[in-house]
Image (cartoon, helix red, strand yellow):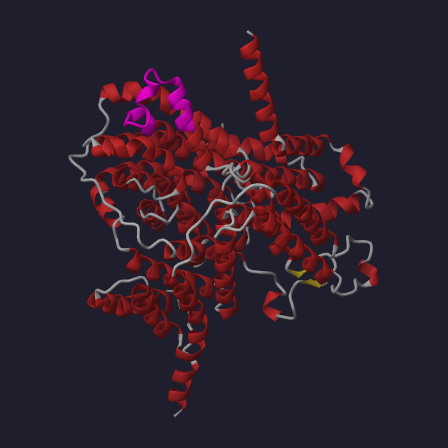
């Protein structure tokens, strides 16, 4: 469900307050640089502008119903979990293996059942990335802790 | 007038540059033709890989992709009624009805010829206008640049006109993202939460990829049920002489509109296409045919959206102020390459600038042939199952975000930017204003800080600069544009009733 603009505006106002509070924690400016504009100046100015715009959003949203939107399907949440786990899995399994797993997990989560095609993608995608980026452009991807351990043993 | 051929020829006789322009054109048409992938996203995805190249080939590649991607969107708009990119939305209004009537080839031919005409006219304007504008910009100091930055941000109020307020908030959020890291004038770290990787600021590329590509991936995940059916492309044919006579007025008018809209900071191809379509309808002798499959309804938006590409590069190169979302990405690319867009770039890197001009010119000519010859293939590419396309896109996102600094923090930033971008998009905030804010953040903050030092912390110092005051006035007009339009319409309708 799309949020009401009033709620969106209120959330933004809350975020502005948090942002302002964070600016109070900025370090001290050395005395020799104190004639410069303080580091809090610009972020606070922008936060103030966002706060004013958010107030307008709150005001204009009152009495206006948001357009209904469909609830998020299970596939969406599965996708979020898969892409977030990609960053976690990379540390363990390494980039190429992780991308191979993603190449299986995402199509399956999205309802694809042609397993031959999925298998081909899972092999070809990491292989192509290895060829182009590691061999071609010298990008060193993390090997992952498990492979590191295996190499040590 | 110096056309800069002495700088351009070495660039254009380099086989590698030519090869990259051809590659950028093909990739651009393919990306433009794939629903969900836009030229902005294509340039964002390719940007990290272009950094392995020298600046001239890199920017030539991105510029070619920008031009071709804008045209590529029309292929799917016509054949499957699913515009590959937002600028092609208006093309579908008449392009798809033409395809349903069995005139897909004619519609594609009109789209290609109109796009090429608009694109070439805009590159010619770019070639002459950008150096002139750059010469004007020599007289700009920090106060003028700050005012120009404010004007550019104010223009966010009028892009994708539905949510001006949200666009402005998005732009400000981008400015806030740009403040993360060590403040260069005082050495104080801001919003870093003790994470050392953030001391140099949030990297532009992961944010860009996250906001454009990961956000779109998540959007696709919530809409898996939609099926796309392609209309068969019968024999492709170029517009006949009669067709050309019918649309030449619309092409010229829409090209002018596209160039003008493109030059305005922050405005881009989508708005140009919508205005181009409306104007084509207004000037048409048969406006009642619009929406039912008329060639003018294809020519108008296609000429306008491609003309906006060259127009958008004018302020991007001459002032360092992006003329569109994709131009903002290219501007970010120039900055990451260590180049400083603006008037001095014309002195320091004439080869780069003329390389861009001629890359865009060549791309426009190339996609006429590639687009027409390959339309059947591209229409099939557009039907590649999303279940295979998007895992590939995600892999490119991952590698692109990681590759630049070889840091997993950048991958996390990309994923977080994608999630935040999705939540914002669902609530009516587009990614383009945020990117604009991120790109303009450094310029706006630095020029404001320098101005305040010059003015001894007195805001009234801005009053002494007529140029700055002009930009502030334009910003006020831009912000109140919707209100002014509504008032004028009310007055006009009242006048009409009285008469």
Q: Farthest residue toward the left?
A: B235
Residue B440: tell me if it is visible.
no
Q: Farthest residue toward the top?
A: B499
Could you tell me which quadrant the C terminus of chain B lies in? top right
Residue located at (41% from left, 60% from top): B397
Magenta-highlighted residues: B276-298
Residue B452: tell me if it is visible.
yes
Position of residue B337 relative to residue B159, above or below, is below
Camera-side residue of B369 and B197: B197
Residue B148 on image: x %, y %: 64, 38
Camera-side residue of B161 and B136: B161
Position of residue B409 relative to residue A65, above or below, is below
Position of residue A108 relative to residue B280, above or below, is below
Image label count = 0
B149 relative position to B366: left or right = right
Identify the image quadrant of residue A135.
bottom left
Residue located at (40% from left, 78% from top): A143
Residue B291 in magenta stretch: yes
Residue located at (46% from left, 66% from top): B402
Residue B53 in magenta stretch: no
Position of residue B16 relative to residue B97, above or below, is below
A88 relative position to A132: left or right = right
Is the magenta region chiefly helix, strand or loop? helix
Residue located at (46% from left, 45% from top): B326
B186 relative position to B194: left or right = right
């Amino acid at each position: 469900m799309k949020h009401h603009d009033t709620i969106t505006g209120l959330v933004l106002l809350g975020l502005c307050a948090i942002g302002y509070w964070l600016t109070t924690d900025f370090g001290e400016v050395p005395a020799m640089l104190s004639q410069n504009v303080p580091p809090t100046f610009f972020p606070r100015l922008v936060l103030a502008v966002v706060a004013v715009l958010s107030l307008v959003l709150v005001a204009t949203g009152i009495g206006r119903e948001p357009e209904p939107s469909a609830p998020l399907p299970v596939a969406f949440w599965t996708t979020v979990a898969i892409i977030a786990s990609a960053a976690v899995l990379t540390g363990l399994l390494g980039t190429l293996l992780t991308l191979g797993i993603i190449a299986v997990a995402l199509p399956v989560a999205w309802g694809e059942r042609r397993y031959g095609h999925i298998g081909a993608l899972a092999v070809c995608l990491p292989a192509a990335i290895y060829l182009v980026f590691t061999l071609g452009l010298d990008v060193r991807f993390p090997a992952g802790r498990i492979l590191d351990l295996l190499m040590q043993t | 007038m110096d056309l800069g051929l002495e700088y351009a020829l070495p660039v254009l006789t380099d086989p590698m540059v030519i090869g990259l322009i051809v590659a950028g054109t093909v990739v651009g048409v393919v990306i433009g033709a794939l629903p969900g992938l836009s030229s902005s996203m294509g340039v964002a995805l390719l940007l990290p890989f272009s950094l392995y190249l020298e600046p001239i080939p890199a920017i030539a590649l991105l510029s070619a992709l920008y031009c071709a991607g804008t045209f590529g969107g029309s292929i799917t708009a016509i054949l499957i009624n699913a515009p590959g990119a937002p600028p092609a939305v208006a093309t579908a209004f008449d392009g798809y009805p033409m395809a349903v009537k069995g005139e897909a080839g004619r519609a594609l031919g009109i789209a290609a010829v109109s796009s090429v005409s608009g694109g070439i006219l805009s590159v010619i304007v770019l070639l002459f206008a950008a150096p002139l504008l750059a010469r004007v910009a020599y007289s700009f100091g920090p106060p003028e640049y700050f005012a120009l930055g404010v004007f550019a941000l104010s223009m966010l109020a009028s892009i994708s006109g539905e949510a001006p307020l949200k666009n402005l908030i998005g732009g400000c959020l981008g400015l806030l993202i740009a403040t993360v890291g060590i403040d260069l004038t005082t050495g104080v770290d801001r919003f870093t939460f003790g994470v050392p990787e953030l001391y140099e600021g949030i990297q532009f590329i992961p944010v860009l990829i996250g906001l454009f590509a990961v956000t779109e991936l998540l959007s696709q995940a919530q809409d898996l049920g939609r099926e796309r059916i392609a209309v068969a492309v019968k024999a492709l044919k170029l517009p006949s002489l009669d067709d050309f006579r019918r649309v030449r007025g619309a092409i010229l008018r829409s090209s002018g509109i596209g160039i003008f809209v493109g030059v305005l900071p922050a405005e881009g191809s989508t708005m140009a296409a919508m205005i181009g379509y409306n104007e084509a309808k207004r000037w048409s002798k048969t406006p009642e045919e619009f929406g039912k499959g008329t060639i003018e309804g294809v020519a108008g938006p296609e000429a306008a959206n491609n003309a906006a590409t060259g127009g958008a590069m004018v302020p991007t190169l001459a002032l360092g102020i992006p003329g569109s979302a994709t131009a903002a990405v290219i501007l970010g690319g120039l900055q990451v390459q260590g180049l400083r867009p603006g008037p001095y770039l014309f002195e320091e890197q004439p080869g780069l600038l003329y390389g861009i001009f001629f890359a865009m010119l060549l791309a426009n000519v190339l996609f006429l042939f590639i687009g027409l010859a390959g339309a059947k293939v591209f229409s099939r590419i557009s039907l590649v199952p999303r279940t295979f396309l998007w895992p590939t896109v995600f892999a490119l996102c991952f590698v692109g975000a990681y590759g630049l600094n070889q840091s997993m923090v950048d991958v996390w930033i990309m994923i977080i930017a994608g999630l935040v971008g999705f939540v914002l998009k669902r609530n009516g905030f587009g990614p383009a204003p945020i990117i604009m804010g991120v790109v303009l953040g450094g310029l706006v903050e630095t020029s404001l800080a320098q101005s305040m030092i010059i003015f001894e912390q007195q805001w009234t110092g801005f009053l002494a600069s007529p140029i700055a005051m002009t930009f502030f006035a334009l910003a006020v007009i831009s912000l109140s544009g919707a209100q002014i339009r509504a008032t004028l319409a009310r007055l006009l309708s009242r006048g009409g009733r009285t008469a």
